[in-house]
Structure formats: C-alpha cells, structure tokens
Image: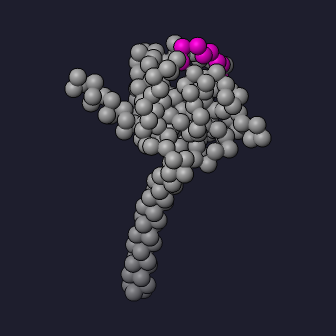
Amino acid sequence: MTVLDAAVVVLAIVVLLCLLLLLGIVRRLRDLTERLHRLERGRPPVDTVPANLDISDFTATSLRGEPVSADWLVGEESVVAFLTYGCSACKVQLPLLREHAETPGGKILIVAALVPGEEPEPAALRAEVGDAPVIVEEQFGGPIQYGFRVDKYPTFYLVGADGVPKATAGSLRDLLRARTAVQVGATAG
C-alpha cells in the first residue's frame, strides 16, 4: 500500500507541475497574441496625441443611463477605451480592463462602436469587464470616436485629471506603460 501511496503523491506533483507550466504557456500566448495584433495593424506601441484633438463636444448616455460628457473625465485620471463587439484584438484587452478597473483610483470609459453587421453584446461585455467601467455604445464613427480621432480598434487614451488626453496606444498595457513615462516626465520638469 505504501508504494501505491508514493505513486499517487508523485503523480499528483507531476500533474501540478504540468498545470503550472500550462498556465505559464497560456499567459505567454496572450501576450504574444496581443503583440501579433499590434503588428498586424502596423501601429507603434504608443502614439502621440494629435495636436488638434478636441474632445470637449461630446455627450452620451451610458448603458446604465448615466450622462457622460467630456466634463465627466475631469477630476481624476481616466482611461478611455474604444472597442467593437466583433473585434478579436479588443476581446484580448477585456481581462486587462477588468484588472485595471479593480485597482483604486481613476475612471474607465468604454466606448463600444456599433459596427454594421456585428451583433451588440453589452451583457457579455459587462460580464467581462465588471461593473466599474462606464460603457457607452455609439454608432461606428460616432461623436466620441470622432472627437478622439479614433480610426482603429482597439484604441486606448489616457486622459489627465484636467480632462486633456496625454497618451494613446493600441493596448491597455502599452497605455499604462506610457502613463508611467508621462508621470516621470511631469515630475522631472
């Protein structure tokens, strides 16, 4: 019986090691998938904010019925995410958005562009990102997308507490790295 017990313990250890290896592989695949999507779009990791960007003229209503405008972005640092429901690169970003939403401080606004031919899935989006982000749906090329000059999805903007966009990127991870660079530059100057 002791040989059987030893075999079960060894087998359990091997299974746990394989599970840990599998989790590492899945994490690496997510990172590589994100990089691949960025390369496919031909975008640099972090872009400069267009000089003529004027986000002051938008108003919308969130899926929960809350009014959202450019003034809503003032007061705290905000992340504005532009996604579409059918975009596979956008879906890769949803767990990162949820994780970021669970950290204290800042606001998250998700603008879900309604692309003709795609089925809106607001309940699925809410299930993926949680309750913290404010979600607004608008037609493809709508006023918020136009104000931010969005032409690719996903696109993320970092908006300062003053309501002025500071950085933009094609992934949330790159945007948060840019936030660190912007903060370091602000304290150095």
In this orientation, which residue lies closer to the viewer: 182 or 40? Answer: 40
**So how many labels did they put on this image?**
0
The residue shown at (59%, 39%) is 153
Question: Residue 126: where, in percent of width, then height?
Answer: 62, 35
* Up-down relation of residue 43 to residue 109 (above or below): below
The residue shown at (40%, 18%) is 161
Q: Is residue 69 visible?
A: yes
* Up-down relation of residue 22 to residue 30 (above or below): below
- Quarter of the rendering occupied by the C terminus: top left
Question: Residue 92: where, in percent of width, then height?
Answer: 55, 47
The residue shown at (61%, 48%) is 88
* Residue sitting farthest toward the right: 117
Q: Is residue 62 visible?
A: no
SS majority, magenta:
loop
Question: Residue 30: where, in percent of width, then height?
Answer: 49, 54
In this orientation, which residue lies closer to the viewer: 88 or 101? Answer: 88
In the visual, does 85 lie left or right of 183? right
Q: Which residues are magenta?
A: 55-64
In this orientation, which residue lies closer to the viewer: 147 or 5? Answer: 147
The residue shown at (64%, 45%) is 87
Question: Residue 99: where, in percent of width, then height?
Answer: 46, 40
Magenta includes 57? yes
Magenta includes 30? no
In the visual, does 67 lie left or right of 106? right
